[in-house]
Image (tube, rainbow, N blue to C red):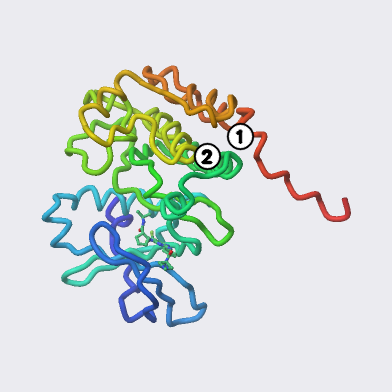
């Protein structure tokens, strides 16, 4: 039953952990690197959510859904939620520790990524989305800020705060960037998992160019207008393969967007996919 899934995992409390360094600030509280006291000594990220903050922002239900969804996901490119517990003031999420940290910090440090690095991230992102959509989960908030990097630089979707079971109708006013919104959400229409296809196109563009395609730093309304018009322009630095893939995802009609399995087969993705290690003795 759903109660069991959202019922706090009994055996955990703050006393179960040795506290490590702070990793940064999450939306509703700090995140700490911690280690379980009992062997085997697991390293985890402990994300605190202040209940008062959740109430103030009217996101209790959304948070419960985020926990329920993420707890049931098992994929190498999706950050694991191992469990949670709470005290009178806070909810604590026991999350997988992503050793190489926040992807958006790498993006802002480098300005933009090479085509090889971008293609490898999009390959992994597409794998994760195929998995999520297979479980009828729409992410709805794909952007660099929600992505982390594992020990070997592998991509991890780290936040499910806006995910829903498909199809969704957004009731809440959206906060944060509009840059990733597809036309159907800008126009407040019913939407389905194809919103993640659009966001994948925006992410691909932003990785290689360092800014999202429809951004207008002067006016939000103009960003809306550019999205609704699919006012897509490429700088000359972008390869034709990359332009081809992005142009097949940033399509107004959700039904015309390139299916994810065809993204995995796209020349731009295949070209940069790491060759499988030759079998031993080969
Ligand atoms: C997706 C979501 C929206 N984002 C988040 O939750 C953010 C909010 C704060 C941190 C992060 N949350 C997580 N971060 C990690 N790993 C991590 C983070 C930062 C560094 C790092 O660069 N420093 C400490 C550096 C080290 C160098 N100095 C100079 C600056 C800080 C290294 C490893 N693992 C799991 C999580 C998670 F998600 F489980 F909580």
- Give ligand 1's quarter of the image: bottom left
> In the drawing, what numbered circle is on residue 203?
none
First in sequence: mark 1 or mark 2? 2
Of 75 and 253, nearer the camera is 253
Report whether residue 75 is seen: no
| Image location of residue 115, percent across then percent down | 58, 39
Of 259 and 211, nearer the camera is 211
Quick check: is the Cβ at mark 1 less than 8 Å away from ligand 1? no
Callout 2: SS: helix
Q: Determine whether label 1 and label 2 are within 8 Å by CB.
A: yes
Q: Is residue 120 left or right of residue 221?
A: right
| Image location of residue 220, percent across then percent down | 22, 33
What residue is shown with label 2? 122
Of 218 and 263, nearer the camera is 218
Q: Quadrant of residue 257?
A: top left
Callout 1: SS: helix
> In the drawing, what numbered circle is on residue 269?
1
| Image location of residue 32, percent across then percent down | 35, 71
| Image location of residue 266, percent across then percent down | 60, 28
Q: Is residue 210 left or right of residue 59?
A: right
User: What's the residue at 54%, 30% (across, down)?
Assistant: 238
User: What's the residue at 29%, 56% (across, down)?
Assistant: 6
User: What's the residue at 40%, 36% (across, down)?
Assistant: 136
Packing grade of label 1 (10 A; few <14, some 14-19, many >=20) is many
User: What's the residue at 36%, 40% (across, down)?
Assistant: 139
Q: Is residue 125 left or right of residue 185?
A: right
Q: Quadrant of residue 268?
A: top right
Of 22 and 46, nearer the camera is 22
Question: Farthest residue toward the left?
Answer: 56
């Amino acid at each position: 039953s759903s109660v069991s899934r959202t019922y706090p995992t009994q055996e955990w409390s703050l006393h179960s952990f040795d506290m490590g360094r702070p990793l940064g600030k999450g939306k509703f509280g700090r995140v700490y690197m911690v280690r379980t006291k009992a062997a085997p000594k697991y390293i985890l990220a402990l994300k605190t959510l202040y209940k008062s903050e959740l109430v103030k922002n009217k996101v209790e239900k959304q948070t419960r859904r985020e926990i329920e969804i993420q707890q049931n996901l098992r994929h190498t490119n999706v950050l694991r939620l191992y469990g949670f517990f709470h005290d009178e003031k806070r909810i604590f999420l026991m999350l997988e520790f992503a050793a190489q940290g926040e992807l958006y910090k790498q993006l802002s440090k480098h300005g933009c990524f090479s085509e090889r690095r971008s293609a490898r991230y999009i390959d992994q992102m597409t794998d994760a989305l195929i998995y999520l959509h297979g479980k009828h989960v729409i992410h709805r908030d794909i952007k660099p800020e929600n992505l982390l990097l594992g020990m070997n630089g592998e991509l991890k979707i780290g936040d499910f705060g806006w995910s829903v079971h498909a199809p969704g109708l957004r009731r809440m006013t959206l906060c944060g960037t509009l840059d990733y919104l597809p036309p159907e959400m800008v126009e407040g229409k019913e939407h389905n998992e194809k919103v993640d296809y659009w966001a994948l196109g925006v992410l691909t563009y932003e990785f290689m160019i360092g800014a999202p395609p429809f951004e207008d730093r002067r006016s939000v309304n103009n960003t809306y207008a550019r999205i609704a018009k699919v006012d897509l322009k490429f700088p000359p630095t972008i390869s034709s393969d990359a332009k081809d893939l992005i142009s097949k995802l940033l399509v107004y009609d959700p039904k015309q967007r390139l299916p994810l399995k065809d993204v995995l087969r796209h020349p731009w993705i295949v070209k940069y996919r790491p060759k499988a290690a030759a079998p031993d003795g080969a």
